[in-house]
Each structure stands twice: as structure tokens, then as C-alpha cells.
Amino acid sequence: MALSLSPSLLGGVSLALVSCLAFAVQAQSTTPQPAQVQPAPAPAPAHAEIPALQATAPSPDAPDPSLSPECRVPGSKLYTLAKLKAVKKALVEHRAVQVLTIGSNSGGLGTAATYPVRLEDALTRSLPDIEVTVESRGVSGEIAFGAAERLRNQVAEIEPDLVVWQVGGNDALARVDIEDFAQSLAETVAWIKSHGIDVVLVDPQYTASLAKDDYYRQFVQAIQKVAEREQVPLVQRYEAMRYLAGRAISALKGDTAQSGAGFRLADLGYRCMAEHVTRAITVSLLQPDVAPVPATPVPAN
Amino acid sequence: MREPNAVDFWRGIALITIFINHIPGNVFQNYTYSQYGISDAAELFVFLAGWSIGIATRGRDGVPEPAGRTVLRLLSRMVEVYRAQLVITAMALAMLAGAALYLDNPLLVEWHNAGPIFSDPIQATVGWVTLLHQLGFFNILPLYVVLLGLAPAFVLLSRVHLGLAIGISVLLYAVSLVFEINIPSWPVEGHWFFNPLCWQLLLVLGFAAHEWRRSSERFLAWRRRLMPLGIVIVLIGAVLSWFNLRPDPLAVPEPRLLFIFDKSYLSPARLVHFLGVMLAFQAVFGLIQPRARWLTRQLAGLGRNSLAVFSVGSVASLGAQLIRFWTGGGIATDVFVVGCGLASLSFTAWFVEWRSRSPRPSSAA
């Protein structure tokens, strides 16, 4: 790491985060990416920390203006929050943050950059002066049948500060028993956390043809319950994509029958994922150390 | 066709086990032996491949065939396996894409790591044709391709001295394990699901077991004597597996791959467990054969035609997964898809042998 640890730098980083988020929330412009603000050369507070900034937390019900227009979703439909102790500690100590993404690395059809590259860019923009590196691994197989074991070995191989895990895709398509899956997921998340590594879960995608599939909805809800119980942030990709799909339908004046709509939405989901994950991480970092974890919103059926 | 023998019989069992385990969540999965131990059918498959190389590279009289012929034989088999891998991967991709279109479900094109082939086709096409990008469950044949590429070296070394072949194999295994060396996957970050640099040891051990069985009385005596040890290992494996006990990969000392249970690197625990399984079950074929001839004939038929049966099984298991997804699963669906799958494996074995028996019209287009 190029930068050494000093109180003024810590202050600078804290202020950068403050201003970044404050700017992001207040600005009503159509900034395409999370706001980028250079740290102000201000005098450092005596005990610099990542500040608790509830005042600047985005309004949960309005589309989050810090997201690029095509990805704009209200916070309440995008994430549930929890503390990210390991990342916060790394920020306070001003050392590099290593992120491991698990799951698909698609950044959308024909895009120049894959999702891990976009995530690294977005996180680097949101956390100026902190070196963020993102490694990625795909997962073969199902969490309920052995993939959880391989995932542990991947985590041990890389020893990241944060695991961003797109979870459940293979299991949901294989229609494994939801309880078996949830138990395996909870055990794996608890194991990762027990080693001082943060976890952010990303639930599976929404698509219209599965909107009425009870199993799939219960599956998504099971992930939300695990995230709540294990106190890890969750990127509600299902809810967010459903919101985006609804917006697309109203934009098309009810013309839902257009062929390929599901595929375009899936593509949009991948384009937005890096931004959405970054937003969930940065807002989670603002969680106060003492306050209770906010209740998980009940997913709409 | 050769008479049913233990190698073909066990290979048939491995093929059926792999087929069933490749339909995750189906009810029969709970009854495959993979659920009751820390190694599984993949080990059996590779070990028996080594054993078969031992048989194939000697003439009927037991004399080793000329070196040049051995090399050509193994390399031509490698080409055959590579061709099979391309065909089944292409079919799998078309099945996933077709199902995604038919069911209007874009999630299906992301299943089993297929995503990059559709979202990033330029890189991923190079990836899957060069075997650097593998679909989930379609990763055994790439291993086999590399093993067949390495096999001539080991077979020829063994003709100098079998110990030399085993020594080099163990060394390669140990170095790969300690330094975590594996073939990278591409364009997606990561590594091969089955690391050939480690799994080659099992191939060489299978080959060596065949050589010793031919020539060493001591080997046969020790194999019998160690059977109780094998049973103990199997029991320990069953307990570990049943209670889901395994080392914490972040808590073991370095080099951690020596201590954890890892399939990609065939970690020592899996290897020991598999050798235990071999010792424990060595007499089973002899017991079953006189009592259930129809069964052994069927299983050995699958084993004799393992590449064709495996290929059809891979495609059939993906088909079964798609049907389970589409219908929502359930026991009736499982009975149907597994039943149809087993019938298609059996038909494949029969068909391949029928075709090789029948005179082929060479000029027919």
C-alpha cells in the first residue's frame, strides 16, 4: 500500500466518506455513478473513525439518486443492512480491502468490463484512498450438496476481508429442499463470519416467468431470513429487479408482451449489480456500532 | 464381448452414481454411496481408468506392446475423449439456451457456469473449446483428456521401473498440493474443478494396482490382509460424512491442502478414504456375480462402454435437471427422470456394442 497510516489521513478518509455519502444523498443530479469527492485537507479529529452518519442515510422509499438512472431503485427495495466490521476495521486502519465475489461474473451483455472489474471500480470510487481489490470465483453445484464445502476452501485460499456472495441460483434451479439450503447457507455464513470476514449476500434474480412460482419466492425469502438472522447485509436483487421491471412496464405503457423482455431485464440486473452491491456496502458501513440492526422489510408477494 | 469382470462392474456402478449425483436434489441421491463417505465415484472412475490402461497396453499374452503403439493408443483415446467433451458441452449449451427461450427464463442460461458463453462469447468460446472454461458437472472429461495426455509418460516410465513411475507421480502430487498448483480456468477467474496434477496419482495407482495384481503374490496377500483396515476406514468415513465433520480450512496449519477435504486437489484424506473403499469392497464382485448375473451383466455392459455411457449420462442428467426445474420436482418426477436416464444408459451400452458387431456400410453417406 502506497499510503502510510497517519491521523491526518484517517481524518481525510473519514471526511471523504462523509462527503461522498452526503453528496450522494443530497445531489439530485443524474450522476451516472456513485459520487466521487476528493478528501478535503481538513484538520484531523483526535480519534478518527468511520463516522456514524444516520443523518445522511438515504431515504428508504425514494429512488436512490446516487445510482445511475437505469439502475435507480429505492433503498428499501435494494438492501437490508448490517454491520461490516472487518471492512470498517480495514478502513479505520487504512489498509487495502480485499473482496472475494462468488457467483456469476457477468457485467451485462457486450459490456467492456465484467462484474468483478466494475465492482472494483465502483468500490474504489466510493472509498477513495483505499486500495480495493476484487477477486472472483464461480461456484459449481449446489450449496446444499457440497458447493458450500468448496466455497469454504475458496475463502481459505484467498482470505479476503469481505465475501460478496450471489447465492442460491444453482440451488433454486435444482429445486433443492429450501430448509436444507437455508441451513447450509446459515452454517456457511456463520463460519465465514467466525473468522472475522464480512459477508454480503446477493439474492437470486427476478424474472417474470418465475413471479408466480411459490417455491422460488419462498427460496428468496429463506435467504432474507438467513441474512437477518446472521446479521449480514443483503442485496435484494429479486426486489430491485422486480421494481425495475415494473418501471419498464409503465414506461412501455403496459406493453409487457414484448419478446425478450425477461432477457433484457436480466441483462440490466447484471449491469446494475456492481452499483447495487457497492451501495449496500457503503450504506452498511455507515451503520452505527451500537444501534440495533434495522428490521428486514417483508418482501412483497 | 468380454465377460463381466470386476473392473467393468465397478465402472458401471460409478457411471450410475455419477449420473444420479448429477441431478442434484433428486430423491435417489440420498442412496448413492457418495453420501456415506468423503470420497466419491469420481475417484473410482479415475482409478479404474488407470487399471484399464494397464490392461490395454499389454497384449493378450501379457507382454507389453511396443512403446510407439502405446503412445499412439493413448493419444488417440485422448482425442476421442476430447471430441466427446466438445459434443456434450455443445449439446448442454443448446439445451440450456433452448430451455431458457422456451420457458422465457433468462436464469437458465446462467446455470452451471454457462453464463459467460452467452454474455461474453468471444472469450468464452475460446475458453470452452480449449477446456479452460468448464460447465458445472461437465468437468470430468477435461480431467481425463489431460490424464490421457500424461499417461504415455507414466506407462513408459513404468517399463523402466514401476517404482519410478509411482515416485514421479507422488512427487508431482505432493508439489501441486503444497504449492497449490492447478490449471487456471479462463475467462472466469479460478481453477479447474478437477486438478489433473493431483488426480494423476490415482490414475497411476490404478495402473500400478493392475501391474502388481498380475505379477505380485505379495500384493494379493496384503490386499486380503488389509481388508479389515479398509472396513475401518470406510466406517470412519461414514461417520465423518454422516455428522458432516471436517477440518476447518481456515484453522488448519499450512500447507492447508494436506489437511482439508478438498475434491479439486484430491486431498490426502480423500485418497486414503478411497483406498480404504477399494480394500473393503474388493471381494464384493465375487459375491454378487454368481447370485445376480443379470445385474452384473448390465453393469459390466455400462462399464465396457464407459465413454459413450458417460457422455449420454451427462446430457441425460442435464435434461433431468431441466425437467425437474420445469415441473417443480417431486418423487414422481424423480422416478420418471432417473428411470428414463438409466434406460438410456443401458440402451447406449447395447447400441454401441450392436453397432460394433454389425458390418458398417462404408460407402453409405
Image (cartoon, rainbow, N blue to C red):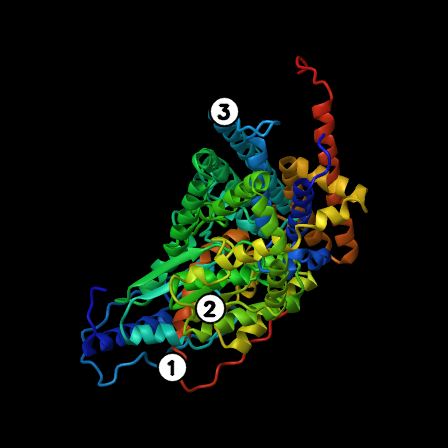
The answer to which quarter of the image holds residue B239 is: bottom right
Q: Amino acid at mark 3?
A: Pro
Task: Name the residue beneath numbered marker 3.
Answer: B66
Instruction: Please say whether residue B190 is visible from this viewpoint.
Output: yes
Q: Are marks 3 and 1 on the same chain?
A: no
Q: Are marks 3 and 2 on the same chain?
A: no
**Which residue is located at x 80 percent, y 42 percent?**
B293
Q: Nearer the viewer, mark 3 or mark 2?
A: 3
In the image, residue A243 sits, relative to residue B124, either above or below, namely: below
Mark 1 near mark 2, Cβ–Cβ under 8 Å?
Answer: no
Q: Amino acid at mark 1?
A: Ala
How far across and down, in percent of the image, does residue B83 sit? 55, 32
Q: CA distance from mark 1 to mark 2?
A: 23 Å
How far across and down, in percent of the image, does residue A271 sit? 45, 54
Kindly state the secondary structure of the residue where label 1 is placed.
Answer: helix
Task: Name the residue beneath numbered marker 1.
Answer: A55
Q: CA distance from mark 3 to mark 2?
A: 59 Å
The answer to which quarter of the image holds residue A137 is: bottom left
Instruction: Please say whether residue A275 is visible from this viewpoint.
Output: no
Chain identity of mark 3: B
**Which residue is located at x 71 percent, y 35 percent?**
B348
Q: Nearer the viewer, residue A77 or A231?
A: A231
Q: Is residue B30 left or right of residue A79?
A: right
Mark number for residue A200? 2
Compare marks 1 and 2 and give the one earlier in the sequence: 1
